[in-house]
């Protein structure tokens, strides 16, 4: 049986999925700001959707992959949790998310991804930071270590 690992976008956008096949994490609830999204979440849980804790070992693997693509700064704790849960279920899981950083890391981990309302990413990318002043490039950070200007995220290469 295929399980759908649901990001908050599923409940925000109202994707029609059999609740018995939905698995999510508890931190998704904190991202639901509207009454409609909270109601959809509640109905899904009443209909059989499961809320599970992510495996700490899988969480570590997700963080390593996110460091490799340099998406770690973009991922929230909820993003990491749903990626961990999808990785835990392996080939029996389809991750539902519109977040491009989540999709990027999922592709690296070999997790099947389906967008909710946006387009799916075409290429897996690795990111870097470029100084807006001196144009030097860095792996991480917000301020240039050389000239003090702000760093801007830019695509380094396709993986």
Image (spheres, grey):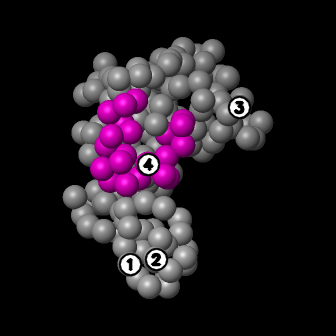
**Secondary structure type for disc 2:** loop
In this view, the mark in front (4 or 1): 1
Residue farthest to the right?
A: 35
* Cα distance between the residues tagged 4 and 3: 27 Å
Q: Residue at x 48, y 31 (%)?
A: 81
116 sits left or right of 122 in the view: right
133 sits left or right of 155 in the view: right
Whether residue 151 appears in this view of the structure is no
In this view, the mark in front (1 or 3): 1
* Cα distance between the residues tagged 1 and 3: 45 Å
Compared to residue 14, the image places residue 26 above or below, namely above
**Residue in the foreground of this view, choosing between 98 and 62:** 62
Residue farthest to the left?
A: 159
Nearer-N-terminus badge (1/3): 3
Nearer-N-terminus badge (2/3): 3
Residue farthest to the front?
A: 146
Query: Quadrant location of residue 34?
Result: top right
Compared to residue 140, the image places residue 26 above or below, namely above
Alpha-carbon neighbours of circle 1 within 10 Å: few (<14), some, or many (≥20)?
A: some
Circle 1 is placed at which residue position?
136
Q: Is there CB contact under 8 Å for labels 4 and 2?
A: no
Marking on residue 38? 3
40 sits left or right of 94 in the view: right
């Amino acid at each position: 049986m295929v399980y759908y690992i649901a990001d908050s976008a599923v409940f925000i956008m109202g994707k029609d999925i059999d609740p018995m096949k939905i698995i999510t994490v508890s931190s998704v609830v904190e991202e639901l700001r509207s009454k409609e999204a909270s109601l959809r979440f509640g109905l899904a849980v009443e209909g059989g959707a499961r809320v599970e804790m992510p495996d700490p070992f899988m969480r570590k693997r997700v963080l390593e992959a996110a460091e490799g693509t340099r998406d770690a700064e973009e991922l929230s704790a909820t993003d990491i949790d749903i990626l961990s849960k999808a990785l835990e279920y392996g080939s029996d899981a389809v991750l539902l998310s519109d977040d491009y950083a989540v999709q990027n890391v999922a592709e690296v981990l070999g997790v099947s991804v389906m967008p909710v309302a946006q387009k799916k990413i075409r290429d897996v990318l690795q990111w870097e930071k470029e100084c807006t002043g001196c144009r030097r490039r860095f792996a991480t950070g917000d301020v240039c270590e050389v000239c003090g200007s702000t760093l801007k995220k830019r695509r380094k290469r396709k993986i």
